[in-house]
Image (cartoon, rainbow, N blue to C red):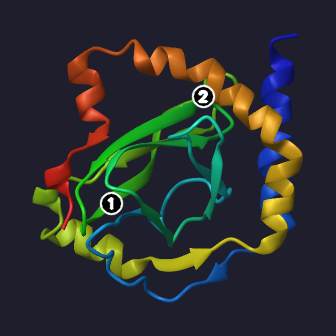
Amino acid sequence: MRLIPWILLVALGAGAAGCSRVARAPDPQPPGANQAAITFLRAADTIGSNSITLYDVSATEIAFIGLINPGTKVAYPVKPGVSRFMVITTGATDFLELNAAPGKTYYSEVVNREPSQAFGMPRVGLRPVRYEELGGADFRRLNDATGYVTKGRRLDVWYKNNADSIAGRRDAALPAWQQQTPEQRAARTLRDLDGR
């Protein structure tokens, strides 16, 4: 019976990918003085071509950010202060926290972690990109090689039809995230000084 949620998750991911292709988006404007932003990036050579769904879980009501495929990036505006984001994949649910300062943009790379024990597929997670990395060659290559995309309108309909299942995954995974040590949690948090 424990296999059923994983099967449903695979179906959810496939359904999201099939609803609509993401559309190319223009480069975002820098955030204003009373706003901040985060950009999620996924390298083109990432193993596994499946679309990954991103969510803002800062409040009780989840906000669906969109899909991110290999070779793309998604910009998302946030209010200054603490935000929490979630990615759901076949093998895992992962979180990232952001403590945003006004006027700054932050970056998170969607990366593969260890394979899922259930399916042998890469488990995808959210890695905070530190300020020290932003001027480096590796980040410049990643940023230059990815293009901005935005979700199609049909994906919002898909999310509305699957919101209860997605909230269930958040509720099941969040306690383990909250029980991390301060050091573990800091390693998965974007600090205010990580923006530019």
Image quarter (top left, top right, bottom left or bottom right) of the C terminus: bottom left
- Count numbered badges in the picture: 2
Q: Residue at x 55, y 65 (%)?
A: 70
Q: Give the answer, above or below, for where 66 lies relative to 149.
A: above
Dividing the picture into quarters, in which one does residue 146 lie?
Answer: bottom left
Q: Is residue 188 left or right of residue 18?
A: left
Q: Which mark is residue 107?
A: 1
Q: Secondary structure at mark 1?
A: strand
Q: Residue at x 79, y 56 (%)?
A: 16
Q: Which mark is residue 186?
A: none
Q: In the displayed image of the protein, which residue is found farthest to the bottom? A: 26
Q: Which mark is residue 116?
A: 2
Mark 1 surroundings: few (<14), some (14-19) or many (≥20) residues within 10 A: many
Q: Residue at x 18, y 66 (%)?
A: 134
**Gap between marks 2 and 1 measured at Cα:** 25 Å
- Mark 2 or mark 1, which has the lower sequence index? 1
Q: Is residue 150 left or right of residue 127?
A: right
Image quarter (top left, top right, bottom left or bottom right) of the N terminus: top right
Q: In the displayed image of the protein, which residue is found farthest to the front? A: 34
The amino acid sitting under disc 2 is Ser
